[in-house]
Image (tube, coloured by chain):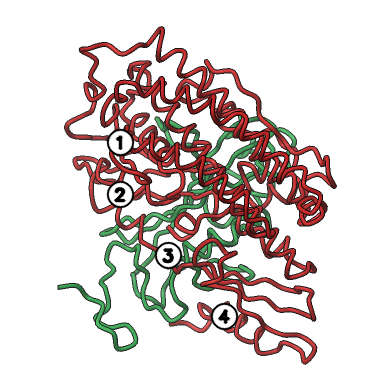
Chain colours: A red, B green
Amino acid sequence: MLEKYNQGYQKYISKIASVGSTEMVINMGPQHPSTHGVLRLELITDGEIVTDVIPHLGYLHRCFDKHAESMNYGKSIPFTDRLDYLSSMNNSHSFVMGVERMLGMEDKLPKRVEYIRVLVCELNRIASHLIAIGTYGIDIGAFTPFMWCFRDREHIMNMLEWASGSRMLYNYIWVGGLFYDLPVGFEERCKDFVKYFRPKLDELDEILTNNQIFIERTANIGVLPANVAINYGCSGPMLRASGIKWDLRRVDGYSVYPELDFDIPTGSGAMGSLGDCWDRYKVRVDEVCESLKIIEQCLDRLMSDFARLPDFDPRALVPKKINLKAQSYYMRAENPKGELGFYFETQDKTDVPRRVKARGPSFNNLSVLPELGKGVLIADLIAILGSIDIVLGEVDR
Amino acid sequence: MIDKLLQDLQNKFGESIHAVEGAKQATLIVSSSILVELSKYLRDSSAYYYDFLANITAVDYYPENRFALVYNLTSLPYQTQLTIRVELPVTNREENNLPEVPSVSSIWRTADWHEREAYDLMGIYFTDHPDLRRILLPDDWEGFPLRKDYEDAEYYHGIPIKGE
């Protein structure tokens, strides 16, 4: 191997070797609970101040790209569930929409299928945000909100298990349709859940959002200016908390989102400055409320205009074999964590793609950590990392 | 929109830029020599503001000795998307002869990790990159696994890793 290919590694080695006598190198992770998985952070510290953060990824690398380019599109859908395993529905929705757009069938889908997709995606978004909120509480030192969030999330898991047969990794959304129609009675149960869940959000506000200790730990910590967020490719709640109203559900208007009424919460700096940890937390809480609004509208339409019919077949349009012409397409969709993109490059005369690349929002959101982590206390670094809300399955893919 | 953009860019950077005909998303093919200047112009020019680099993908065209890099840009102010392709022909596929591209991480900082990933998995060398080392695989990994001609090693640190 040529000398210059190895220069980056040599530079890193000499950086660690030249740490001064007043500094210390600390390993955080890969088994540290606050890293939310297997992330290893190498910290160079001066006393309790972090002077440099070097993230090491790849402990959960499962070769999604290589896998996806060795078999056909339908077989990759279960793997997309496992990228961001807390929001499986959203992942497969994005992947499937990409394939459907390349096939040119995105306008042919029955409305009931589209509404069911949005319904389950938004349920999954709530579940994902509940984990983000609950584990963030634990990172800061509040245990009770975690239990409450998991209690409520369990209701969503049970409902989605009822629909798809699996608790976390659903493989429910297929190219051209769905695995099955919703089970009989799902809509009513979902309505009951929304009625049950709304007051729980007020309780969450009381115990965590407006908790003085929580505010002290998160306000004015890890302030991310909007221009830095954009330059680092941050998306989703990270970007919105910095004050940018950017939501692909509105911008691209995919699926039936243009027909639905919801707001895009952005950070306000209410407790400190714009784009701090509290803002990022608050944007997620607000998004849960917006998702509830979307779910209610979907349920209304699924029970009136697009009600269940005895001869409705959600698999009617599922293609037997997906034959695409050589082309390339970049599909992006709004995941709970941000912009999930799939770049496809197909080849003629085969149903196996040449290249599929997943652009995970967590990967890009995490890349801003060395920037945010310079000059903060170690305890604050935990607060910052928790507020980024990463899922390592998606960082490492 | 692509015609106007193409006209403007050709006036500024010469005729080597051209658009992909019949692509579903606006795509430009540029040569790697003007990539950095072009990126800077696309980001800063008030007519485009492509300030958000969403994704960098490296593609292998085995059995041809050819690679490509695909940059997916987004303009947040104008809500537009643009794809830039850089074709990278190589003379052979040996590991001392990696295709070379200038890094755009000075323009979009997010490119840092994306380029490290392209180097790690596909073996593309980015000149002027601040920190080019493997990102997903261990530092002592040999070969570039996303290349279509990659073959698994028999052993890794004495541990047999080849399946039955």
Instruction: Classify mark 2: helix, strand or loop.
Output: loop
Q: Are marks 2 and 3 in contact (CB under 8 Å)?
A: no
| Residue ID for mark 4 | A7
Q: Nearer the viewer, mark 1 or mark 3?
A: 1
Which is more toward the observer, A176 or A348? A176
Choose the circle earlier in sequence order: 1 or 4. Answer: 4
User: Disc 3 sits on a residue from what chain?
Assistant: A
Determine if marks 4 and 2 fall on one subunit: yes
| Residue ID for mark 1 | A164
Q: Nearer the viewer, mark 2 or mark 1?
A: 1
Please rate how many residues cluster around mark 4, counting C-alpha atoms within 10 Å: few if below 14, some from 14 to 19, many from 20.
Answer: some
Instruction: Classify mark 1: helix, strand or loop.
Output: helix
The outermost residue toward the left is B164
Q: Are marks 3 and 4 in contact (CB under 8 Å)?
A: no
Which is more toward the observer, B126 or A314? A314
Q: Are marks 1 and 3 in contact (CB under 8 Å)?
A: no
Q: Percent x, y for residue A211? A: 77, 47
Q: CA distance from mark 1 to mark 3?
A: 26 Å
Instruction: Classify mark 4: helix, strand or loop.
Output: helix
In the image, taking residue A104 as reference, residue B125 lies left or right, namely right
| Residue ID for mark 2 | A354
How many numbered discs?
4
Instruction: Classify mark 3: helix, strand or loop.
Output: loop
In the displayed structure, A188 sits above or below B69; it is above
Q: CA distance from mark 2 to mark 1?
A: 30 Å
Q: Quadrant of the N terminus of chain A?
A: bottom left
| Residue ID for mark 3 | A60
Please rate how many residues cluster around mark 2, counting C-alpha atoms within 10 Å: few if below 14, some from 14 to 19, many from 20.
Answer: many
Residue depicted at x 38% and y 16%: A111
